[in-house]
Amino acid sequence: MDSPMRRYMTAAGLSCRDLAREMGTSKSSVAGKVNGSIPWQQSDLIWLAIHRNLSPGYVLGIDAYLTDGGWKPETRIPGPAGTRHGD
């Protein structure tokens, strides 16, 4: 899967080893987080926001979902079955 972080790192010419060195962690940890097999930690998200100006939503792929055609604000989330609105 092509994550927003993978796209960012490619565009920035940044390898997992480079980012790991900057963050003070291991290459395997960063690679696992970028490919989705290891969850990002709050401390990672804070570091990326401060040092790389990346929002947590972007790193987690939430911003991309909202802006790349996933959820649309005009789309209503249906209520539980058997409920009626507007009566």
Image (cartoon, rainbow, N blue to C red):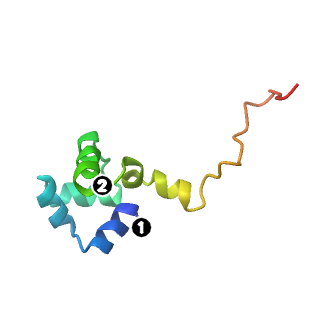
Q: Say which element carries label 2.
A: loop
Between tags 2 and 1, which lies in front? 2
> Amino acid type of disc 2?
Asn
Q: Quadrant of the C terminus?
A: top right
Which residue occupies the foreground of this view, 1 or 67?
A: 67
Pointer 1: residues within 10 angstroms few (<14), some, or many (20+)? few
**11 relative position to 81: left or right:** left
Indicate whether 1 appears above or below 82.
below
Identify the residue at the far right of this view.
Answer: 87
- The quarter of the picture where residue 29 lies is bottom left
Up-down relation of residue 44 to residue 4 (above or below): above
Q: x, y percentage for residue 20? A: 16, 59
Q: Which residue is mark 1?
A: 2
Q: CA distance from mark 2 to mark 1?
A: 20 Å
User: Which residue in the structure is indicated by mark 2?
Assistant: 53
Q: Closer to the camera, 66 or 3? A: 66
Left or right of residue 77, residue 87 in this image: right
| Neighbours of disc 2 within 10 Å: few (<14), some (14-19), many (20+) | few
Label 1 sits on a secondary structure element that is loop
Residue in view at x 29 percent, y 68 percent: 9
- Does residue 65 appear to the left or right of 5 in the view shown? right
Q: Position of residue 78 (x, y in %)?
A: 73, 38
Residue at point 34% right, 61% down? 5
Specify the label residue 65 is tagged with: none
Which of the two discs, 2 and 1, labels the residue nearer the N terminus?
1
Q: Amino acid at mark 1?
A: Asp
Residue 37 lies, in percent from the top left, at: 33, 54
